[in-house]
Image (spheres, helix red, strand yellow):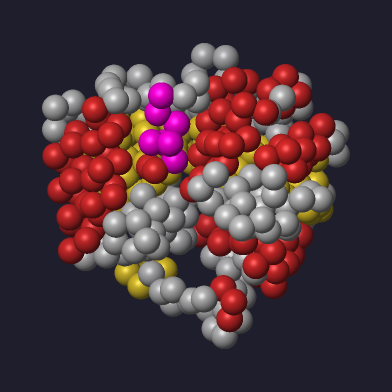
Amino acid sequence: MSSGAVLPPRLRPGDVVAVVSPSAGDAARYARRAARGVRALEELGFVVEVMPNATLDRSWVSGTVRERVDDVHRAFADDRVRAVASFIGGNHGAQLLESLDFDLIAGNPKVLFGYSDMTSLLHAVHRRTGLVTFYGPAVLPQFGEFPRPLRETVDHFRAVTSVAEPAGAFPVLDGIVREFIDWADDEVRPREQEKALGRRVLRGGRARGPLVAGCLPTIRHLVGTPWQLDLRGSVLVLDVPDSRYRVCDADADLWHLRNARVLDGLAGLVVCRSRHFDGPLAAQLCDVVEEVTRPYGFPVLAEFESGHGDPALTVPIGPAAELSGAELTVLDAAVS
C-alpha cells in the first residue's frame, strides 16, 4: 500500500450510490440508457441517487464547473452515501480540480469509481487525500449495457469494492465486445462477444509498486499541472480510448509523456486492450509502446482487460501490486 493510503468502507447491499457527471452530458442525451444503468445498480442491491446536475447537457459538458463541483461536494457531504459513481467520462473533468474541497472529501471517504476522463478526479482525490479510488465501470457504458451489465465486469467490481481483503490476481477474460451499437437505438439485442487476442508480454520481468490507472490522453492533459501523475515506483495500468482515438494519437501522447519525463522511474507498465484496436491495429499499438518504452527497461504487458474494452476489470488506485509476466496481482485490500 502506498504511504498514507486511506481505504473507503466496503460496499454492502442497501448502500447509497450517488451518481455525478463531472464531464460529458451524455446522461441527458441517452436518458433511456442512463435509466437502465441506474436500474442495474439498484438490482445489485444499491440505493441510487442521481445528483441534481448530473443529467444536464451544456454542449460538450453536463453543467457549469460550479454545478458539477456542487454535485461532487453534495455526494461526499451526504453521510448516507457510500459510493460516488460517474455516468460517463468525456474530456473536461480537469475543469473541476481547482474548485474541489479536498478537506470535505478527505473527511468523508467513499468508493469513488469511473474511467476514461474520470482519471482527473480519481487521481486528484487520491493525490490530495490518500483515498484509494477505483478505475472501473461507469453507469452509462457498463451498467447501462443492454439488457444487463456484463457478468465479468460486475463480478470483478464487486470483488474489489465489497471485500475487505486483497483481490489477488486479476482474472483473465477470454472474450471482448468489439461491436458498436448506437446508444440512441440500443434496445435491439445484446452485443456479441468474440474471442479476445489474449494478454501479450511485450517485455518480461517482475515489478512491484502502488497501482496507478488512467486514460492516456487524460494523463497527458495533467502534465505540467499540480495534478500531474507521479509514477515513480508505480505499476501503471494505461487505458487507450476507442472511437476517434487512433494509434497515431496514442503514439503522440506516449511520446509526450516520455519527453515530459513522466515515465521516469516507472516500475511496470500494463496497457489495456481497446475495442477499437483489433488485429493489425493492436499489433501496431504494441510496436509503438515497445519503441517509446525501450530506454526504460521496465516490464510491459499489453492487451489487459480494463478500461475501454468490455468486459472490464476494476483497478484500485493506491494498493500495492505485482506485475510478473502476464499476471497482475493486487497485494493489498482496497476497502476496509
- The image quarter containing residue 216 is top left
Picture coordinates of residue 227, whole percent (x, y): 50, 25
| Furthest residue in direction top, as rendered | 3
Picture coordinates of residue 101, whole percent (x, y): 72, 25
Q: In the image, what residue occupies the spot 73% across and 38% down?
A: 66
| Relative to 199, 28 lies left or right | right
Q: What stretch is highlighted in magenta?
A: 218-224
Q: In which quarter of the image is the C terminus?
A: top right
Picture coordinates of residue 310, whole percent (x, y): 45, 61
Q: How many marks?
A: 0
- The image quarter containing residue 222 is top left
Q: Nearer the viewer, residue 275 or 321?
A: 275
Q: In the image, what residue occupies the spot 63% across and 20% down?
A: 129
Examine the structure image and report whether residue 77 is included in the region drawn in magenta: no
Can you say whether 151 is above or below 72 in the image?
below
- The image quarter containing residue 164 is top right
| Relative to 277, 170 lies left or right | right
Q: Which of 167 and 83 is in front in this view?
A: 83
Can you say whether 128 is above or below 252 in the image?
above
Can you say whether 129 is above or below 150 in the image?
above
Q: In the image, what residue occupies the spot 58% across and 81% down?
A: 185
| Relative to 139, 239 lies left or right | left
Q: Nearer the viewer, residue 172 or 298?
A: 298
| Furthest residue in direction bottom, as rendered | 188
Picture coordinates of residue 34, whole percent (x, y): 68, 65
Q: In the image, what residue occupies the spot 39% across and 53% down?
A: 241
Examine the structure image and report whether residue 223 is included in the region drawn in magenta: yes
